[in-house]
Image (cartoon, rainbow, N blue to C red):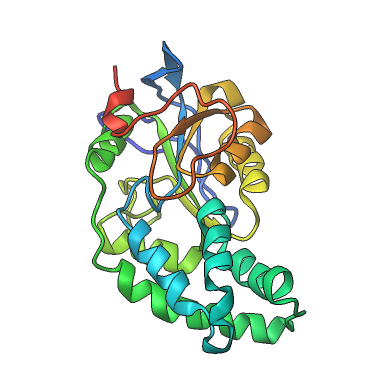
Amino acid sequence: MMNRTGGRKNANRDLSLGWFCANSGAVQLRLAGSVCEVDLVIFDCDGVLLDTMEQKIRAFREWVPAQHTQHADAFMDRVMHGFGKSRFHHIKSFYADIVGLAPAPEFLKEEIARFTEICEPLCASAGWLPGSREFLEACRGAGAMCYVLSGMPEEPLIEMLAAHGARAISAEEPDAIFDRIYGSPPGKPQRMEAILSETHTPAHRAVFVGDADADREAAAHVGASFVYKPSKAARPMGEMPTIVEDLRELLV
């Protein structure tokens, strides 16, 4: 796809169809007690790459409408156990499942915009989590493909990462640090299927690094490895054979 010291090869590009990614390098990672070669590393963003969890939690709490503050605790419990899912999911669930209303699509759109106005300024000042940028650069240096897959809407996700010096490869920036940056919609399981297909990567050569049950479920959906990086989100359910506090612990 591009010439770099990590050995990433050149592949044909068709800008009308998007970038074509070819498996051209692998990084060795410690997964479940073994050393494995990985062609594709997929990252959640909040709590994995960027230190934005406190800001996101604050934004959800500040978003709760004044006329429904009695439901704030129930809503925040759902949020803490549902990190990794989109803000659309959380806000729709608040009205439909907690308040007991059926919000119209236009009303939901306005409420999501209101949440965005609260959230994005709070997250603007957040930095990289310790070790995350270094781990990402090590994966890149080895020639592995690096994707972001987040529950955030795609446009603000791209803007937030760009503000921290992390962009996706394009004609203007052929040496950017990510191959692609994907947000919501669709859901993470469906997007994982698409990522493996577009990169021609077998599931056993891919790993998803996340901090929430939605991330674990997305990895399990396609049979990829899952690395759990604890954050302020509720701990995912089920067995997790690879847990790290600093992503650099994965490097051999």
Coordinates of residue 149 in the picture (x, y in percent)? 50, 49
Relative side of 66 to 26, left or right: right
The residue positioned 46% from the left and 16% from the top of the image is 32
Classify residue 68 by image quadrant: bottom right
The residue positioned 57% from the left and 21% from the top of the image is 204
**Residue lying furthest front:** 70
Relative side of 85 to 6, left or right: right
123 or 194: nearer the viewer: 123
Q: Can you say whether 62 is above or below 168 in the image?
A: below
Q: Can you say whether 16 is above or below 148 in the image?
A: below
Q: Can you say whether 78 is above or below 155 in the image?
A: above
Q: Is residue 7 visible?
A: no
Q: Can you say whether 250 is above or below 77 in the image?
A: above
Relative side of 251 to 13, left or right: left
10 or 113: nearer the viewer: 113
The residue positioned 54% from the left and 39% from the top of the image is 236
Instruction: Report the quarter where the C terminus lies.
Output: top left
Q: Exactly how many numbered labels are in the figure?
A: 0
Instruction: Report the quarter where the N terminus lies.
Output: top left
Coordinates of residue 82 in the picture (x, y in percent)? 57, 54
Coordinates of residue 109 in the picture (x, y in percent)? 62, 81
Q: Is residue 199 visible?
A: yes
**Residue lying furthest bottom:** 67
Coordinates of residue 205 in the picture (x, y in percent)? 53, 23
67 or 91: nearer the viewer: 67
The residue positioned 25% from the left and 56% from the top of the image is 165
